[in-house]
Every structure is written in C-alpha cells, then in structure tokens.
Image (spheres, grey):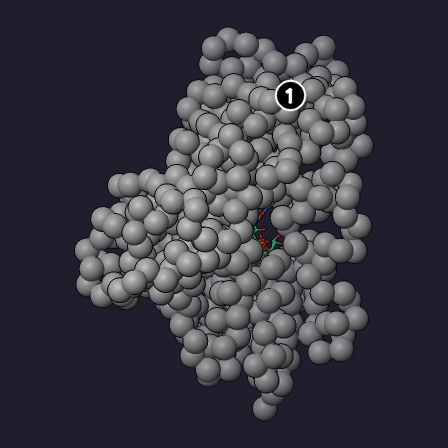
Amino acid sequence: MTETVVIVGGGQAGAQAAVSLRQEGFDGRVVLIGDEAVLPYQRPPLSKTYLAGELARERLFVKPAAFYEKVNIEHMLGETVCAIDSSEQVVSLDSGQTLHYDHLVLATGGRVRPLPYPGADHPQVNYLRTLADVEAMQDKFTEGTRLVVIGGGYIGLETAAVAVKHGLKVTLLVARPTPLGRVTSPEVGKFFEAVHREAGVTLCCDTEVVAIEDDGGDGKVAAVVTNSGYRVLADMVVAGIGLLPNVELAQSAGIACDNGITVDEYSRTSVDNIYAAGDCANHPNPIYQRRMRLESVQNAVDQGKVVAATICGKDKPYAQVPWFWSDQYDLKLQTAGVNSGYDQKVVRGDPESRSFAVFYLLEGRLLAVDAINRPAEFVVARNIIGKGLSVSVERLQDDSIPAKTLAELPGSTMLSSASVQAAS
Ligand SMILES: Cc1cc2nc3c(=O)[nH]c(=O)nc-3n(C[C@H](O)[C@H](O)[C@H](O)COP(=O)(O)OP(=O)(O)OC[C@H]3O[C@@H](n4cnc5c(N)ncnc54)[C@H](O)[C@@H]3O)c2cc1C
C-alpha cells in the first residue's frame, strides 16, 4: 500500500519537508496543502530586496512549479485545512474535501499579531507577512509618501530602511527603549537606532501607540496617536509587532501546544503520526537545554528536514544552533545563537566603523553573537556554540586575532552537558 504524507502549510517548512521526503527516498504520495494561492516562497526578501523592487517575483519561490511536478509532489494551493480527525487519520478542507493521511505534517507557520488599538482597522494600515501584503502596498512605496512604521523589530527596521531609501518620509515608532529590544542588547539596538536616524528616519523610542484615527474622514490619511499625545499623519502605516503561531488546528485536534505546537527532537507531536515544523513548532534545543519556538528560515528548513527523516525512519534529532540575519542599508546583521540570560558582553571591533561583533556569554560560555558586517565572526561563533567550545574573552575582543582562529583556543574543550545545563 502506498503511504500518503499530507503537509499542511505551503511555507518554507512545508516545502522543505516535501522536498526532503523525496531526498530521503520516500516514494509514496506527498500532498502539500497551502491556503495562500501561490507556490511556497521565501519571506525574507519581502521586507528587503523584493520590497525595494530589486528582486524579480519568480526569484522568491522556493522551487519552480516544474520541480514539484518532476518529483511528484502534489500541491493544493488556496486550500485551507480546517479539521484533523486523528483517529481516522483524515483531514478536512474548507472546500469540503477530505484526505486520508498516514503521516501528517503541520507546517502552519504564524500570522501577524494585529494592532490592539482602537482604529487599527483603518484602510491605510498594512502588515507585512505575505507576498499579497507586499503587493498591496507597493503602489504607495513612492517618494513623498508619509509612512509610519509601528514596531522596532527586524521587519519594522527593514521596512523603514527600504522606504527611506525610496524617498518616503518615514517615522518609526518603537515601544521599547531601543529598537530590536526583544532580540538583542541595548548596544546593538542603539547602533541601529543611530544608523536609521542618520539615514533620515524619524525614530521615536519608548513610544506606545494608543489609537489610530482617520484624518480627513475619507480613509486616505491615518493619524497615529501616541502615548505622549502626538498625532503622526500617515498615507500608509506598516505594523510589525510580532507573530502569533498558527496552533488552533492542532489544538482542536487535541495536540499538545504551549507557545507553539509541542514537538520532541524528532519533530513528533503528542499525537501519533503527526509532526510539526517551522514557526508553529516549539522544540527542545539540546544546546541550550530548553524548549524554544523560533521564527527563522534556518529553523523552518532544518525542522522540515528532521520531519522528513523521521517519517522515513532515519531518526536525525534536531540539534542546531539557531541563526538569523537582517539586511538594512549597507549592513548585514547575522545572529548565531540565542542571547537570553547572558551575563557578559564582549565587543569586537568599533561600531563607528560599521563592522563589529558583540559576543554574549553566560558564566564564560558563548551563548550568541550579533555580527554586523562580520561574516567570519558569525561563522566561528556558530561553530563554537554548536560544539560547546570554551572561549577566551581576551581573544574575542582582540580584533587583531583573525576571527577564524577564535575556535582554536589552546586547550579548547567541550563543555560537559552538566555544565551547560547548570549555566542555562
Ligand atoms: C517580511 C519577513 C522577513 C523575514 N526575514 C527573515 C530573515 O531575514 N531571516 C530569517 O531567518 N527569517 C526571516 N523571516 C522569518 C521566516 O521567513 C519564517 O521564519 C519562515 O518563513 C517560517 O516558515 P514556516 O513555513 O514555518 O511558516 P510560514 O512561512 O508562515 O508558512 C506557513 C504557511 O501555512 C499556511 N497555513 C496555515 N494554516 C493553514 C491551514 N490550516 N491550511 C492551509 N494552509 C495553512 C500559512 O498561510 C502559510 O502560508 C522573515 C519573515 C517575514 C514575514
């Protein structure tokens, strides 16, 4: 009997799971179901080169249509899975169809966190998650448009960078004391704050939005009202205040969820033959000895591979160093690891030169790095974190020592898992 794998979600993780199933030798039926009406595509360019009009649309797609045909991956696009019957191993679609599965992969990703303020349904308020979102706002991405960006995370900052380069008049409202406050240190946040100001962005930190009003009564101009009483006028608002994992489908099928769909190191959920991967999945990370839910391409791709291996009976536990990148102006920020809980920061290089790295340590163990235009530091830090090598603070901060040798500390040793656990 031919086995069927049904994959719910046509994003990076779903597409990777489908492709990896074939690479692992799965010769049964693979059905990829996605509620967006387009083939799986990469989201990172949406707030970078694609928003800037520098990338052709066809370059966004993970694979061209012909690829899926060639390797016999069926796709059902513009279709939503609305229910899972795990005892019968059947999924139901909004369209009324049902599909039997032997293995079910939930790669449902996430959706934007909606602005919680009165007036947030103003017609000029946009979000940036999907290709359709970007295409809906591209007309207004022209010189002179007054843009208010709400949110100082990666998407807000990248949008502001592209917009100001296109001659839009950009105001960026950040609720925290510095941009990127949730993911990096105040020093790195302040660096990006200065960069954006220098580029011409009006950037306001510690600024909460309290309401969005209509200025003029015709829906054309929004007035973004802040806690300090300002009304910032906008021809367009772009909000980037975070992501909500799409867990409801799993929850209604009785699958355990806790900040995402709970999976083990093999991407298995609490229900037999059901797996989860990508932004929607909460997994145990052996390097940090704790559970985490990540929103990154690396995680979506690597978990897609793990799911496929598990289904094919080739258990390959997930044990990756998380990594991420962000492009703003001439800067590439590359982050390896997760810095939460650090007790020491080491800066290597001079932020003034727009090329430096900040290493984060806990009790002498390297947790993470933010490398700004420093690819070598990023690569070496990933290696150090992944292998649990010890580091010397003096060497990390000595910029005259070649970065690639930082992992070659004489006497470098693997930290025992006990010491890692004690530190996390
Ligand atoms: C603008 C932007 C910029 C980014 N930049 C970076 C970056 O620079 N670096 C980086 O590492 N990461 C970046 N990311 C994050 C990265 O793109 C995501 O982590 C990754 O795409 C997650 O993939 P996923 O497949 O898990 O989820 P998603 O991409 O969200 O895909 C899930 C898909 O499943 C669909 N779906 C959900 N429920 C159902 C259902 N019931 N039935 C059918 N379909 C369903 C969803 O609509 C969606 O199409 C960025 C994200 C955005 C939005």
Left or right side of 20 for 306: left
Could you tell me the amino acid type at mark 1?
A: Gly
- x 76%, y 77%: residue: 70
Question: Closer to the camera, 140 or 369?
Answer: 369
Q: Name the spot of residue 164 as percent of width and height, x first.
A: 69, 26
Q: Name the spot of residue 211 as percent of width and height, x first.
A: 54, 18
- x 43%, y 76%: residue: 316
Question: Closer to the camera, 364 or 283?
Answer: 364
Tell me if mark 1 has few (under 14), some (14-19) or many (20+) residues whose alpha carbon lies within 10 angstroms of its own. some
Dot 1 beta carbon under 8 Å from ligand 1 = no
Count of marks, rendered view:
1
The part of the image, by quadrant, that contains residue 265 is: bottom left
The part of the image, by quadrant, that contains residue 38 is: bottom right
For the N terminus, the image quarter is bottom right
Is residue 334 placed above or below 300 in the rendered structure? above
Is residue 130 placed above or below 304 in the rendered structure? above
Left or right side of 34 for 38: right
Residue 58 seen in the current view: yes
Residue 287 seen in the current view: no
Question: Closer to the camera, 187 or 205?
Answer: 187
Question: Closer to the camera, 346 or 246?
Answer: 346
Circle 1 SS class: loop
- x 22%, y 65%: residue: 416
The residue at the far front in this view is 400
Q: Name the spot of residue 10 as percent of width and height, x first.
A: 63, 60
The residue beneath circle 1 is: 200
Q: Name the spot of residue 216 as percent of width and height, x first.
A: 72, 10
- x 69%, y 74%: residue: 73
Left or right side of 200 for 227: left
